[in-house]
């Protein structure tokens, strides 16, 4: 395979990736976007096999000596990936995404270490030029931060590990930001020493020290981020993984890695900005500590006060919705935990059959990762024309007869309108403006922000306690 053909195929794969991102920007075109992505990755993988063949010929070594490891990695990695994709539950999708990010970061680190150790095997000049050393330094520390940070994010998203660092609440200590700054400066200093070190042999000591600091820094910048900021963390780590791949791509002179990494990095950065805007948060504010202790204090105070609420049954809720003209449904993470999306679609169909207008309202940070609720409803084949983003439906809540909130909390909390609140200024779904509000939750526990929700105590609000799936199934029977 000639280098011209390899370059052309990489270009075709890059175009496919760009079309994949374009398709994934909207639910109606997401299937086409996924197909473009799969085709682009297949072309890139096969072209890489051809590139290995070309390099083997130039190095005068057996093609099979190199391709055997590549094929072995494809079989093992592809098999594990296919198994995980098949078995993962929708509620565990955020953890899977964090796990994938960690693997990308670790792969970047391993490639960088191999390139520093044997540059000739990657077609890099010996001794390593300063430019390549800088590229490897950048790719290595970004990959290391991505790996360790994603491991912490995985633990926080999972919520089943007792280790303190994996708890959903922020972990902070005195002098934390100063320590992060000192470590960052040390890391950069070691990288500069590595880049400018002379001699034919690489400067392993500053390189490995820089790598160790980067692993530690990845942990330290994620542990102070609470569960409320997890959607931003997921998109942020997605961006990091892309930049790590792009940095390594420059070192290896691989245009495909550069293009694909840049696409992932830039799209992840844009998504992080969108998430921060949806939470009225600055990106740097999130990185420097999450919601922090104020929210936790608010939660503690709220949990001590036993305030009365108006509760009802699934039959009561079904009666209210069945006699309404317009119903807006607000899905939250509780719906995902109960795996109640299919039952919810059945309820929606029965309400529509009775002549009720039903719409779904989606907050950008509802759930545990960006787009979580959209994916959940798509899995149940809810028609896309029934699903509306926050900015498109907020103006309709005041005219809605009933709003049904399923396992959502912070994204409908009117405290975002109260000066002094930890979430003041955060854009929310304005469910509190509806004529009647029905809230399904397991208990009165606070959301990820750790704040009490005044919406639950309003006279217009009726709480229906219980598992979302069981409650919705009872609603379906009552509507009939």
Image (tube, rainbow, N blue to C red):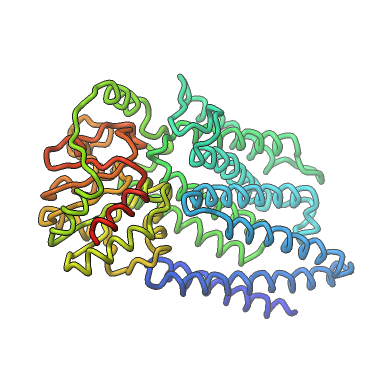
Indicate the position of residue 85 as horizontal and vertical percent values: 58, 59
Q: Is residue 248 above or below residue 232?
A: below
Q: Residue at x 65, y 47 (%)?
A: 106
Indicate the position of residue 278 as horizontal and vertical percent values: 30, 48
For the residue pair 39 and 289, the one nearer the viewer reads as 39
For the residue pair 127 and 37, the one nearer the viewer reads as 37
Residue 277 seen anywhere in this rendered image of the structure: no
Q: Is residue 135 above or below residue 50?
A: above
422 sits left or right of 372 in the view: left
Q: Residue at x 76, y 38 (%)?
A: 204
Indicate the position of residue 81 as horizontal and vertical percent values: 63, 58
**Figure label count:** 0
Q: Residue at x 55, y 43 (%)?
A: 150
438 sits left or right of 447 in the view: left
Q: Quadrant of residue 147?
A: top right
Q: Is residue 58 above or below residue 129?
A: below
Indicate the position of residue 267 as horizontal and vertical percent values: 45, 58
For the residue pair 29 and 184, the one nearer the viewer reads as 29
Q: Residue at x 16, y 68 (%)?
A: 355
180 sits left or right of 209 in the view: left
Instruction: Locate the C terminus by quadrant.
Output: bottom left
Residue 303 seen anywhere in this rendered image of the structure: yes
Instruction: Locate the N terminus by quadrant.
Output: bottom right
For the residue pair 77 and 406, the one nearer the viewer reads as 406
């Amino acid at each position: 395979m000639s280098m011209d053909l390899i370059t052309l195929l990489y270009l075709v794969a890059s175009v496919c990736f760009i079309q994949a991102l374009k398709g994934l920007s909207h639910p109606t075109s997401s299937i086409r976007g996924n197909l473009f992505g799969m085709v682009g990755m297949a072309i890139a993988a096969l072209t890489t096999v051809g590139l290995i063949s070309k390099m083997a010929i130039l190095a005068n070594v057996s093609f099979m000596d190199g391709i055997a490891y590549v094929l072995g990695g494809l079989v093992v990695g592809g098999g594990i990936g296919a198994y995980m994709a098949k078995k993962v539950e929708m509620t565990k999708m955020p953890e899977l995404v964090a796990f994938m990010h960690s693997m990308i970061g670790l792969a970047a680190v391993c490639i960088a270490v191999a390139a520093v150790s044997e540059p000739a095997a990657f077609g890099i000049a010996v001794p390593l030029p300063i430019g390549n050393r800088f590229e490897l330094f950048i790719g290595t520390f970004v990959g290391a931060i991505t790996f360790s940070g994603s491991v912490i994010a995985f633990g926080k998203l999972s919520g089943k590990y007792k280790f303190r660092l994996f708890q959903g609440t922020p972990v902070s200590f005195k002098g934390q930001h100063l320590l992060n700054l000192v470590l960052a400066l040390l890391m950069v200093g070691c990288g500069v020493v590595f880049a400018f070190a002379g001699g034919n042999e690489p400067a392993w000591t500053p390189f490995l020290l820089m790598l160790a600091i980067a692993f530690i820094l990845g942990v330290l910048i994620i542990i102070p981020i609470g569960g409320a900021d997890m959607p931003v963390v997921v998109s942020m780590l997605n961006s990091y993984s892309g930049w790590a791949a792009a940095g390594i791509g420059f070192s290896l002179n691989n245009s495909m890695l550069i293009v694909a990494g840049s696409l992932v990095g830039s799209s992840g950065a844009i998504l992080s900005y969108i998430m921060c805007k949806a939470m009225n948060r600055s990106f740097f504010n999130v990185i420097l500590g999450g919601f922090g202790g104020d929210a936790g204090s608010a939660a503690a105070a709220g949990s001590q006060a036993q305030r009365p609420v108006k509760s009802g049954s699934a039959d009561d809720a079904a009666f209210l919705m069945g006699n309404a003209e317009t119903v807006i449904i607000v899905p939250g993470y509780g719906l995902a935990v109960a795996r109640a999306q299919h039952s919810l679609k059945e309820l929606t169909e029965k309400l529509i059959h009775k002549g009720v207008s039903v719409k779904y309202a989606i907050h950008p940070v509802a759930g545990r990762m960006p787009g979580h609720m959209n994916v959940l409803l798509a899995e149940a084949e809810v028609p896309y024309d029934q699903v509306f983003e926050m900015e498109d439906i907020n103006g309709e809540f005041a005219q809605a007869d009933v709003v049904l909130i399923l396992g959502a909390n912070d994204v409908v909390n009117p405290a975002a309108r109260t000066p002094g609140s930890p979430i003041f200024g955060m854009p929310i779904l304005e469910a509190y403006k509806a004529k009647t509000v029905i809230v399904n939750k397991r208990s009165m526990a606070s959301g990820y922000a750790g704040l009490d929700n005044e919406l639950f105590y309003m006279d217009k609000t009726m709480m229906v306690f219980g598992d979302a799936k069981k409650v919705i199934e009872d609603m379906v029977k009552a509507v009939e």
